[in-house]
Amino acid sequence: MPVAVGKPTFAVRRFEGVCRILEEHGYQPSRLIPILQAVQEEYRYLPTEVLTYVATALNLPPARVFGVASFYAHFALAPKGKYVIRLCDGTACHVKRSIPILDALRSRLGLSEQQKTTPDMLFTVETVSCLGACGLAPVLVINDEVHGQMTPERAVALVDAIITKEAQQ
Amino acid sequence: MSDAPLVNLTINGRLIRARAGQTVMEAATAEGIHIHSLCHHPELKPEGSCRLCLVDIEKQRTLQPACTFPVAEGLVIQTENPKITAARRFALQMIFSERSHYCMYCPRSGTAESTDCELQRLGYKYGLANWEYTPHYGKDWPVDATRKYFIMDHSRCILCRRCVRACNQIAANHTLGVGMRGARTMIVADDDVPFGQSSCVSCGTCLQVCPTGALFDRHSAYCGHDKDVVQTQAACLGCSVGCGIQAVTRDNQLLRVEGDWEAGNRGLLCSIGRFEVVEPKPPRITQPLIRREWQLVEATWDEALAHVAARLREAERVAGLASPRLPNESLAAFACFFQEVLGSNDVALLYGENPPDDLGRTATLRDVADSDCVIVIGGDPCSNQKVIGALIKRAFDNGARLIVVNDRPTELDAYACVRLELEDISHAVESPFERLRHTYHLRVSGVAQLKQAVAAAQRPVVLYGSGLSTTVYAGLRVLPDKARFVPLIEGTNTAGAARLGLRAQPVHGDALYILLGDDMVNGHVLPQRQFTVVQAAYRSALTEAADVVLPARIWAEQKGHVVNMEGRTLEVRPLLDAPNSIQSDWETILRLGGLMGSALSFDAISEMSLAV
């Protein structure tokens, strides 16, 4: 059945990345998680319309795709900042006083438990259950960069350095 | 499953035999041993999420859920002991402390004897008098009231996922799913949109399987517990599928309609059969009405019938139109009245077309759901016979191939592996020209494709609509014998009417007698006659234009039989008493026959309808 195709619009261009990812994974429903990971890499989060698009393309119910996307902490359904700070609050990091670091970061950036991303979309601060680097506790990861043996002061210094760098650009 | 080897096991000291592949729950239930459960439902695939069906199985390290544990030779199982009771109490305590189970506001709440809530019943049974764990009511669980017919209160949800499984496995609609994780887990629709804006088709299957009051019906909530109401097995008269229903009535009111698990529709109903039937209707006609000085005024039965008899006698030619929603008995009486009393054969159906029923062996509703190759020719089951549409989607989910042959786009196109035009199968006998095209691969004949598909399948089912060309039906006649057929008949009892010789066709006459029953015919404009009598249950454009209106019973007050699309005769049982002692259609017609000096007898009518 020929499908009527209109002129590519902005919306279509926006989905080009998703189409490429789906193509790479051969439109296989069983590869849903790797596809979502790749989509998140592309957009830094999983927009609702992209989830629906992925569901339709893979011939899966949208509820199933949403279920998977909302189940894993790794997937973000809301836009995240340019720098995602993941602070470990696993057992080892917690006893090595990770919470004061979290409080310091939040007060420096004006964030809270509810609001995890700064309004300028520069930082997102969240906790994770374990980063698997307990030997370096307390640990935080800024995007893919690991920083061990943190203190509140050093964490704030890291954030300040990024702010200065961003301001120069 | 039935030829699986037998295994021996012991449950509560009783030696029982079960089929390999069955679960402990199924084996126990078959032996009449009840195992408590919240998430298990016999019509759904087991999930094992509530941990209430835990049983003690020898040589197993921990207690095992009976609903998912497969039977095996030599299992020794205990379904009740102190260890199990403690585990169940623990599970119940966890469920009760998870969300806000404030029973007093819930429509399903009751005493230990009267409660309709499966959770509350277990709470009573296991003596849960207080919270052992601090209830987690910090979160405001939403109430989603965006659906027209029923409401979801997430605070009463125990995440048994029966609704999700019903939506996926029974309705094959895939709207519901599970979102988030842990204590934040929620039942979601599509990508977490309000239910009213989702792809939900309001079939209400989720509502029927919900073990708590999380999903409840707007119409029947707080109208009585299960022990206060009367449940009657009946047939839905919404369309020609004739689904099995459990009608829930109380004090001569229809509260709710539920799907009959035992019937061919296997519990599934559509929004029309489940919800529309209890929706508000136009004003009921309880007294005969006669037009006097341009106005319809109330009259007595004697007056009205005498008036009708006189005017019909005066008329040169009387024509009759009947609704195909009526049972055989009403239609037979109507046809008899025209033949015997009026000597007119100008009697027809208001609408509804019966496709030929001699294409091959007839399939049942179960055959459709269990088929591995479904061919839909013409018709639009997803709009006109919604339960059939769902059964086709269910077959598709189970791996059936779907071939759609239609000139119009339908919802099923998205599921079809082959999509043909009706013209493609209009060549039963291959013409030399067609053979030429075939030889040069210009077009593979549609009939050849259908033949191939039927031959390759184990249980092929062909559903065909009415009003197709004879060459299309001829094309279907040459399909291999394996194929089983279901006509997609328009109108509930069109098949029964056809057996009485009634079809939809134009009628002519200076007087018109319309037997409408509770049918709502919208946009039907009939030419003005000298005299029109309408026998109807509700006021409508047709009754407003009539010269005489006679009251009629609605579907739930009628007694009789209808013939569904499978060709099965279904019993129509009276669920309610008619108001103002309105007679059934055939009684009215007999009285009218008597007034017109004819010896129409009940026996003749019942003989005629029995012959159907």
Image: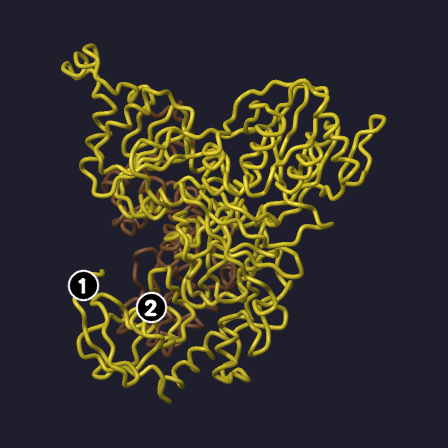
Q: Secondary structure at mark 2?
A: loop
Q: Is residue B601 left or right of residue A84?
A: right
Q: Chain of mark 1?
A: B
Q: Is residue B201 above or below residue B91?
A: above
* CA gap, disc 2 and disc 1: 57 Å
Look at the picture and state if A16 lies above or below B141.
above
Q: Closest to the observer: B320 or B16?
A: B320
Residue B579 point in image, percent of width and height? 71, 50
Q: Residue at x 43, y 38 (%)?
A: B382
Please say whether residue A160 is visible from this viewpoint.
no
Chain that is coloured yellow in the picture? B
Determine which of the numbered discs, if any, sits on residue B101 in the image.
none
Q: Position of residue A28 (x, y in %)?
A: 25, 44
Looking at the image, which residue sits at the far top?
A: B433
Residue A67, visible in the rendered structure:
yes
Res. B257 image quadrant: bottom right
Chain in brown (letter): A
Disc 1 secondary structure class: loop
- The front one of B121 and B488 is B488
Tell me what residue is drawn at x 65 percent, y 56 percent: B253
Measured as percent of width and height from the top left, residue A58 is found at 31, 42
Q: Where residue B295 sits: x, y (%)?
A: 82, 30
B549 vs B75, nearest the viewer: B549
Q: Which mark is residue B4?
A: 1
Label 2, on which residue?
A139
Which residue is outermost to the bottom? B82
Quarter placement of the N terminus of chain B? bottom left
